[in-house]
Image (cartoon, rainbow, N blue to C red):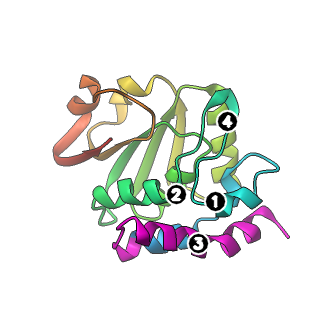
Amino acid sequence: MTSTTRGLLSNSGLVAAAWRAGVRDRRVLEALATVPRGAYVPDGAEVAAGADRPILIAGGQVTTQPSLVAAMVEALALQGGERVLEVGTGLGYQAAVLARLAREVLSVERRPELAEAARANLAAERVRNAHVTVGDGGEGLPAHAPYDAIILAAAHPRVPPPLVEQLAAGGRLVQ
């Protein structure tokens, strides 16, 4: 059984956890149901991918638990035509969920080893509208601005001013 197959088999529990957390957007729940979390975790952690909890990844970082991913993505109120900036790519799971709901996802990750793994994960899952860049997420990606939506998956005590400047008029930012 491949990691993708294991991931899809365990996704019903993740959808249920998102529902219990208050997520009601059908498109977000469908994205959670179809993106195989097991394809976006370190080798050996595929079984744990079915649990609604963070998973330890490189650099002492952790993934965001899927119910929180769903709640944050739902708060963006994506309709399908947006360009989204994600700060904190990790291994690419949230970028893959966003890619099912938006036209384009640009993700910035400060750790090169995580960015490389996320690119490989997204490519293996044939996600073509999510792109990962190595950089300081607090600076955003001004060359591609403005963004209709910005999501901060990385910990920031407050919203960095450059991100506010890169948000399109009427755009949404979730931290």
The nearer-to-camera label among 3 and 1 is 3
Where in the figure is residue 67, as x and y percent of width and height?
A: 47, 60
Q: Which residue is mark 4?
A: 116
Dot 2: element? helix
Tell me the kind of residue under disc 4.
Answer: Glu
Q: Residue furthest right?
A: 1
Dot 3: element? helix
Label 4 neighbourhood size at 10 Å, few (<14), some (14-19), many (20+)?
Answer: some
- For marks 2 and 4, the one nearer the N-term is 2
Q: CA distance from mark 4 to mark 3?
A: 29 Å
Q: CA distance from mark 3 to mark 1?
A: 12 Å
Q: Residue at x 66, y 27 (%)?
A: 59
Q: Are marks 2 and 1 in contact (CB under 8 Å)?
A: yes
Dot 4: element? helix
Foreground pick, 89 / 84: 89
Dot 1: element? helix
